Amino acid sequence: MTLLGFGMVITFMVLIMTKKLSPQVALIMVPVLFGLIAGASSGIGPMMLDGVKEIAPTGVMLIFGILYFGIMIDVGLFEPLVSKILRLAKGDPLKIITGTAILALLVSLDGDGATTYMIVIAAILPLYKRLGINLLILTAVIMLSGGVMNILPWGGPTARAMSALKLDASEIFTPLITSMIAGVVWVLLVAYYLGKKERKRLGITVVPIQESNGGKRPKLIAINLFLTLSLMVSLVMNLLPLVILFMLAFALALIINFPKPEDQRARIVAHAGNALSVGSMVFAAGIFTGILSGTNMLDAMAQSFIHIIPDSWGNNMAVITALTSMPFTYFVSNDAYYFGILPLAAEAASHFSIPAAEIGRASLLGQPVHLLSPLVPSTYLLVGLAGVNFGDHQRFTLKWAIGTVVVMTIASIVAGVIQIHL
């Protein structure tokens, strides 16, 4: 089952990165094939349905999130910000790409990847399109920023690690602040490097602001800003389920900006392509995760972790955990890793007098690579909003994400957050 699980994920990645299949088709057909090989033919239907049901709220939230921010772009909510950035950047790709990293790092403070992607893409995408900057740089820089900030205490991974090990933020997160700072510096350096390359390729060109096809609503900017800020505050305060908040915000946005039903239909049609693309990938991912979990491949992959570590490496269990957190959080979900693998790793480390808190910190360092996983729904949102191919995004971003993990791991060792014994 372990071999089938890894084989399923690897087959999926090869097919989409070589563009042999679209992500939607691969997410459906590959797990079905491996599920049949695993002998789960009689139960494969319920597994797929369970997976779709589990991911349905996320899929619906992303669909309405895309529609909402699409409308906000149409009505010109972000145009003042875009114009300001254009004036400050003076058509310089280096300044825009570096600014993207800074904006993404700041917005990521809310700990929610999907929200970060929607806000930053909505604000920055027009700049990239107007200047002809490679959109893969946009998705890479945003994801790298999110990967570093994803380990904030109110983010999912850290909360899971604290819960699984029964520890608090002062034991797991606080010592990692130095490592996060190193990660932030790395992301900014990567953004600077990519910006220099784009400046060399494109030069510095001032591009005039263009009108969108949706029709601006300058008199409604204040109302739209209030609506968007209210949405963000409600998301952070968790006043209602995310999916409900985005559905309500979408409906209000249409009523406020496009009172006529025919205009409302036109705006929905204008953004239906992006919404359908992301939504279909997310629901297809539900089938993937449903079969991976239902066939017990996921459990087998998690249990195999402990058995591949030689006893002679035990003294360096924290460093091993940090480095292996990259592939393992990529191949399995955060829930499976933090509630299945992490307690086993902490138990094994205890035999070498390594504190559970140290293993917990190490387990969080692989998050920049985890976000590239096909099991992360928000990744489909990012590539869908930016209009880039999922496989292209993976190929372009992976090396920089691995670099982020390595830099943060080295910083953790230097700062004594995790120990290495040579």
Image (tube, rainbow, N blue to C red):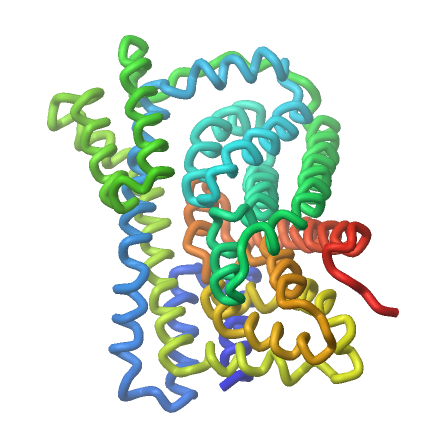
Identify the residue at the far bottom of this view.
39
Q: As drawn, is 357 to the left or to the right of 250?
A: right
Query: Can see residue 339?
Result: yes
Residue 191 locus on image (x, y percent)? 68, 35
Residue at x-position 19% and y-position 28% = 252
Q: Is residue 22 above or below residue 261?
A: below
Left or right of 280, for residue 90: right
Depth check, front residue: 68 or 91:
68
> Residue furthest toward the left?
261
Residue drawn at x 66%, y 20% is 92
Q: Residue at x 64, y 85 (%)?
A: 307
What number of labels is visible?
0
269 or 158, which lies in front? Answer: 158
16 over 3 or under it: above or below? above
Q: Residue 150 in the image: x percent, y percent?
A: 54, 48
Image point (28%, 8%), residue name:
219
Q: Position of residue 192 (x, y in %)?
A: 72, 32
Q: Quadrant of residue 238?
A: top left
Give the x, y percent position of residue 75. 31, 20
Name the outermost residue toward the right.
422
Q: Nearer the viewer, residue 91 or 339?
A: 339
Which of 23 and 63 lies nearest the eye of the viewer? 63
